[in-house]
Amino acid sequence: MKFVPVAAAAALMTAVAPAFAGDSITETEVLAAQQGWCNALVEISATNAKSGQAAAKALAETVIDSAYAYQTGPVLFKPTLTVNPQTFRTEREGALAYFVGGDPAYPDDSGFALNDWVKCEVDNAAVFIVGNSASTMGKVHFTDKDGDVTTVDKSWQFVKDDAGQLRIVLHHSSLEFTGG
């Protein structure tokens, strides 16, 4: 494996990723982006319950387009409940299928966002910020309409685009290990 010197890597990253040349990120912005993601998930679920899957899909498309960086290239998205050969969802269509299902190209997806979620809370273990990039790791707690809570381990990386909006470029989620 060949390693690139830090200065050369920084120059290379600047040369190939000008879409993320925004100002520094603040922790307040990161926390707001995470809460916005949670609010959007609950809203997609409520839209599905009230108006059906097609309406939930339309909302999910808007959410994905505003929260994730798919318009600039692949996003490193590993949802909680995916299996090979579709474990990683580096393209928008795969993310949309995971959230709302209904895509024959992703037959195992039933729509995570359609699970009657009424509450979503982020509990960060840490937030790490360097310039226009922020990484988080912690727990996210999802509560359904019956009061049952599902907790996942979640890591996100956000970058700030030229318009000043935080975009998710990495999203990894997994169920908690319970031992055994």
Image: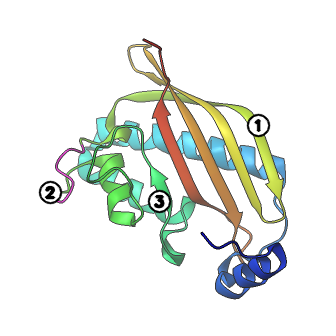
Asked if labels 2 and 1 touch by Cβ distance under 8 angstroms, the answer is no
> To which residue does mark 3 refer?
64
In the rendered image, residue 124 lying in the magenta stretch gets the answer: no
Task: Tell me if residue 19 comes above or below residue 83 in the rendering.
Answer: below
Residue 24, image x, y percentages: 85, 65
Q: Amino acid at mark 3?
A: Ile
Identify the image quadrant of the N terminus. Answer: bottom right
Q: Amino acid at mark 1?
A: Ala
Nearer to me, 167 or 36 = 167
Q: Which residues are magenta?
A: 105-109
Residue at the image position 81 percent from the left and 53 percent from the top: 129
Task: Tell me if residue 17 comes above or below residue 34 in the rendering.
Answer: below
Question: What secondary structure is marked by label 1?
Answer: strand
Residue at the image position 70 percent from the left and 75 percent from the top: 20
Q: Which mark is residue 104?
A: 2
Residue at the image position 31 percent from the left and 48 percent from the top: 100
Residue at the image position 40 percent from the left and 54 percent from the top: 60
Mark nearer the viewer, 3 or 2: 2
Asked if labels 2 and 3 touch by Cβ distance under 8 angstroms, the answer is no
Q: Is residue 51 left or right of residue 136?
A: left
Q: Which mark is residue 126?
A: 1
Counting residues from the N terminus, which is met first, the one under dot 3 or under dot 2? 3
* Spatial separation of the CA atoms under disc 3 and disc 2: 19 Å
Mark nearer the viewer, 1 or 2: 1
Question: What secondary structure is marked by label 2?
Answer: loop
Q: Which mark is residue 18?
A: none
Residue 160, image x, y percentages: 72, 67
Residue 68, image x, y percentages: 54, 61
Counting residues from the N terminus, which is met first, the one under dot 3 or under dot 1? 3
